């Protein structure tokens, strides 16, 4: 188990102030800003931060001193990088150490739904989907500026799109780089707004997009089309279009991934004597198979590579033909007599009892 006291360089009876002072000193030394080009700085900072998080909390420290295992995954697993980790200790936006800054807001994602048949899912199909969303203004082409009018350099960020802020933190003064709140990270300002979009760079319109649904997709599958969603602020990329695919149930088949199951229903005589049947396939053609004499209920015959295509892979699944033998719930006089004769000709030591007929 990691020795957090050793990590911070303090004794086991160190007070809260001692722990805080040790953390501030070590964090300043290990801060990535203080170690440019050192790929290990971030990991050192993480270890110091973890030790401080445990020892600065009375309950965690008591559990650690007892020898209990301290689960820190809930604290650190959600951080995308050192910037998220630094903001955990020093406030939002104060962990930046020279990374890029956000520009104009990206367009929002759009979700739509399409419904296709099982046969279309087997072969793949193109579908047109419609939705209403902001699109780049056709007059100013997304700039927000009137045709012929120039954009002005932002006087707040001098065209950089970002500004530097300095704040006091546990480590002293910390500088962060944030998007300019005047030009919203663009670096340019609209002097004369486009009349069509009122300077927004986008207008709301009905959009039609052709979506290719690949062969083998399953019910509930989702497709992503990058940059085909709503337009963002001027100078930013559009959002993404997400298409949820609903595959209609086909009464002929039960689907299990890339395999299909078709159930053939036979009477007692057909199962006992054997019969030829035409089995439908998802491609629209029939395959003739022979059900041999004496086939038992639940027997499954496999037609290889007659199932669904495997999504993003080669080959197809199988078509499984399951035999269902149906026992009649009522018999005509002729049927009953024939079955009694069959039973009498067999080797069963027990004669069948009299059966009540229905309807005849």
Image (cartoon, rainbow, N blue to C red):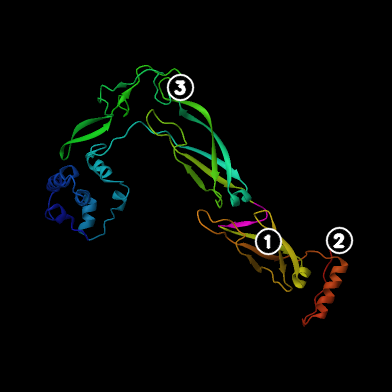
User: How many numbered marks does the figure carry?
Assistant: 3
CA neighbours of label 1 inside 10 A, class few (<14), some (14 to 19), many (20+): some
- Give the dominant element type of the magenta stretch: helix, strand or loop: loop
Task: Decide which of tag 2 and tag 3 comes sooner along the chain.
Answer: 3
Label 2 neighbour load within 10 Å: few <14, some 14-19, many 20+: few
Residue 263, which numbered label? 1
- Name the mark on residue 139: 3
On-image quarter of the C terminus: bottom right
Mark 3 surroundings: few (<14), some (14-19) or many (≥20) residues within 10 A: some
Judge from the rendering whether residue 278 lies leftward or rightward of residue 336; answer left or right. Answer: left
Residue 4's place in the image compared with 29, above or below, is: below
Position of 321 compared to 81: left or right?
right
Q: Is residue 309 above or below residue 99?
A: below
Residue 65 in picture, x, y percent from top left: 20, 58
- Give above or below for 96 relative to 294: above
x%, y% of residue 336?
A: 84, 70
Q: Is residue 207 magenta?
A: no
Q: Secondary structure at mark 2?
A: loop
Residue bounds of the magenta highlight: 250-257
Residue under the point 18% across and 48% down: 38
Direction front: furthest residue: 148
CB within 8 Å, label 3 to label 1: no
């Amino acid at each position: 188990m990691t020795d957090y006291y050793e990590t911070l360089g303090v004794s086991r009876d160190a007070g809260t102030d001692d722990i805080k002072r040790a953390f501030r000193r070590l964090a300043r030394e290990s801060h990535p800003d203080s170690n440019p080009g050192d790929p290990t700085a971030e990991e050192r900072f993480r270890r110091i931060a973890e030790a401080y998080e445990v020892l600065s909390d009375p309950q965690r420290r008591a559990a650690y001193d007892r020898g209990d295992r301290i689960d820190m995954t809930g604290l650190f697993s959600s951080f995308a990088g050192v910037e998220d980790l630094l903001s955990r200790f020093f406030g939002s936006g104060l962990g930046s150490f020279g990374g890029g800054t956000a520009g104009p807001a990206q367009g929002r994602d759009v979700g739509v739904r399409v419904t296709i048949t099982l046969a279309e899912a087997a072969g793949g199909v193109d579908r047109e989907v419609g939705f209403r969303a902001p699109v780049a203004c056709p007059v100013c082409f997304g700039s927000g500026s009137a045709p012929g009018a120039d954009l002005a350099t932002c006087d707040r960020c001098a065209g950089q799109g970002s500004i530097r802020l300095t704040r006091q933190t546990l480590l002293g003064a910390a500088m962060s780089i944030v998007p300019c709140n005047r030009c919203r990270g663009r670096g340019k300002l609209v002097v004369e707004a486009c009349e069509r979009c009122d300077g927004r760079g986008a207008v709301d319109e009905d959009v039609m997009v052709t979506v290719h649904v690949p062969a083998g997709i399953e019910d509930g599958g989702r497709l992503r089309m990058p940059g085909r969603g709503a337009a963002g602020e001027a100078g930013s990329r559009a959002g993404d279009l997400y298409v949820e695919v609903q595959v209609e149930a086909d009464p002929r088949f039960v689907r299990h991934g890339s395999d299909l199951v078709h159930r053939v229903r036979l009477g007692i005589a057909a199962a006992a004597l054997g019969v030829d049947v035409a089995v439908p396939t998802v491609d629209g053609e029939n395959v003739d198979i022979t059900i041999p004499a004496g086939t038992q209920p639940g027997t499954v015959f496999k037609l290889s590579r007659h199932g669904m295509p495997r999504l993003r892979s080669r080959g197809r699944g199988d078509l499984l033909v399951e035999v269902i033998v149906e026992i009649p719930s009522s018999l005509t006089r002729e049927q009953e007599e024939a079955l009694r004769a069959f039973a009498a000709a067999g080797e069963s030591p027990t004669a069948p009892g009299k059966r009540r007929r229905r309807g005849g």
